[in-house]
Image: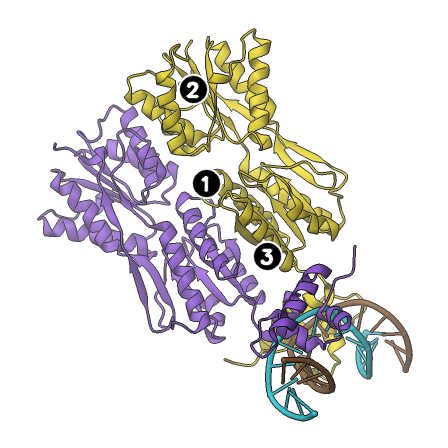
Chain colours: A yellow, B purple, C brown, D cyan
Amino acid sequence: MEKEITIYDIAKRLNYSPATVSRALNDHPAIRIDTKDLITETARQMGYRSNMFASNLRRQRTNTIGVIVPRLNSNFMSTVLAGMEKVANEASYNLIISQSLESVKKEVASARTMFNSRVDGLLVSVAYDTEKIDHFETFINKGIPLLFFDRVIDHDQCTSIVIDNTKAGYDATAHLIEQGCERIVHVTGSLQRNVYADRLKGYRLALMEHGLSYKEALVMVTDLSQEAGQDAARRIQAMPERPDGLFVTNDFCAVSCMQVLKQAGLVVPTDIAVVGFNNDPVSQVVEPNLTTINYPGEKMGEIAAQSLINHLNGSMNIEVTNRIVLHSGLVVRKSSLKKA
Amino acid sequence: MEKEITIYDIAKRLNYSPATVSRALNDHPAIRIDTKDLITETARQMGYRSNMFASNLRRQRTNTIGVIVPRLNSNFMSTVLAGMEKVANEASYNLIISQSLESVKKEVASARTMFNSRVDGLLVSVAYDTEKIDHFETFINKGIPLLFFDRVIDHDQCTSIVIDNTKAGYDATAHLIEQGCERIVHVTGSLQRNVYADRLKGYRLALMEHGLSYKEALVMVTDLSQEAGQDAARRIQAMPERPDGLFVTNDFCAVSCMQVLKQAGLVVPTDIAVVGFNNDPVSQVVEPNLTTINYPGEKMGEIAAQSLINHLNGSMNIEVTNRIVLHSGLVVRKSSLKKA
DNA sequence: TTGTAGGCGTTATCAA
DNA sequence: TTGATAACGCCTACAA
């Protein structure tokens, strides 16, 4: 294992001071262009690499962004992360990624690690059961920018990146109603989370506006897993008055639900029309293809990362913009088309 | 923005030396238990957080593992990453993740960043078109452990984590042959990559052992995208002698291929039996359900991370074990069952 | 069991 | 345009 080259080594070799070498390497304006060239070239030859710790220690910055997500392995989340990585990478930021596995406890631990790693900023989508956000206060107190996306929590000093979940819920439900559905089951997640609460709001709004009454028995709060979907299917079959519409706020869950319903002999969409959420690739594989809400995951990731980076560069202030809403829209496929 | 608390502040407050504080905070054995308690408690109260840069600078370690993958947003890869994150997190390592987007050029750049970030070790799955691995030599020269997984490249000083792709290819093909298939199309990726080359090897082996001749025209090298699947379907339909079996080395690609075939009126598995690869969730959604090779992504991630960490801890040497092979196996579903 | 002191590699300030 | 110097916060011989 060879010795690491430092700016001192370069300085000695060229008979410059370390300060000059440092400046040359950092494109400092007050340096003669030919000495700069000489120094960079020598550095390259000697196999120099800058020591980020020394630099970070000195500058009190890390060029690192922390990301905390519920899970890494969902199509939606990995798409978001792909977008973030792309933007961060281009701006030469590193991404430290950590998953809460849907538990506040791990989320708190992750936040702590991120804090100790001195990330320059933090991007968060909260866990299923997060209630308070005390564990993020440390960031806010220290002035470390914090940005929520998808599953957000309102906070004066943080921006949130979201889609209009209420509208999406409304659109999904209204579409089902227009297709003639009158008893629409809604399968959703923890109402603690904005995304699910808002979609439910949209669902209720659509019912109301179309003169249908809201029935609590038709709303199922689940963890949106595949099992939850299967379970929902069984509950639907057991209902005395058979529902004719189904709005599941997650494609994968919707699909597993559809599969059980189909096995039980129900025909989608004739017997029951179905709408999912996310526009996950499976929605185009299941038969009939699933009507769903298109959720711009990659864009969300890009914008979240870009906003944070802009804030860090001083070219935008996160504390001013409170909320960025991305476009989303209904993608109509066969699973919901009773007419036509 | 408040001032950062350092061990000096704690030392001053308690009238200890910074050295003692440092030792107490790091659980050094030679420290009285009550002073340790006092110090940790005071540190907590004062809102102290250790400065990783200073520490890293001093210790020449980062507790950070670099990961370079072709893409973040595939079900397989995000599952692998989930496994890595879990293990790394438990061992209090951070993960810096970067995607090459299937291009060597970005892979080289990522490697460089990782190098400059002074990761303690590197986990890599190479891009579609990577040929040489000069860009990783710097790591090897510096003694930074390097570990390949899935898409690996043989190197004396690196361990590879893989499944037995040859066997998997063999099993898939043999299964089709046992179902009565005689003209089996194989859709695969770049043969530069071990995974695809080995699966092809298995395919040929199975043909041979069952007395079927290998026909180059039946092998399609593609990028395994959805479009590639659709394309393959069209080429299959255009073949003068209609194939009766299809082995696609990626579930998503297999599914899109199946969809086009079905639209064209072919019946799976009667007209053509299909086997995929990865056991992606879609394989259980498409109809008929897709026979596939189960690929233990999460386990692979866990083992890759664990091996690297063990090596870093000195409890295992990566340069000795050259290759770790995980179990994989055929999952038979309806898409391939001609008999029964 | 605790303290002293030097250095890890940079960069910012001040002076030349 | 360049150089000297002092931090940045931590860790670890060595000494006590």
How far from the left and from the top, in percent, is residue B114? 54, 63
Residue that lies at the very extreme toward the front in this rendered image: B34
Tell me the residue that label 2 is attached to: A274
State left or right for residue A197 relative to residue A249.
right
Q: At 75% across and 41% down in the image, what residue appears?
A: A319
Callout 3 and callout 2 share a chain? yes
Residue that lies at the very extreme toward the left in this rendered image: B211
The answer, for residue A139, to whether it is visible in the render is yes
Q: Earlier in the sequence, mark 1 or mark 3?
A: 1
Label 1, secondary structure: give it. loop
As drawn, B311 above or below B210: below
Tell me the residue that label 1 is attached to: A74
State left or right for residue A312 relative to residue B160.
right
Chain holding disc 3: A
| Residue neighbourhood size for the residue with mark 2, other residues' Cα within 10 Å, grouped as few (<14), some (14–19), many (≥20) | many
Label 2 and label 1: CA atoms lie apart by 21 Å
Label 1 and label 3: CA atoms lie apart by 23 Å
Label 3, secondary structure: give it. helix
Label 3 and label 2: CA atoms lie apart by 42 Å
Q: Quadrant of the C terminus of chain A?
A: top left
Tell me the residue that label 3 is attached to: A113
How far from the left and from the top, in percent, is residue B128? 40, 53
State left or right for residue B123 relative to residue B46.
left
Going by the numbered disc 1, the residue's amino acid type is Ser
Label 2, secondary structure: give it. strand
Q: At 51% across and 14% down in the image, what residue appears?
A: A215
Seen from the viewer's position, the closer of residues B126 and B236 is: B126
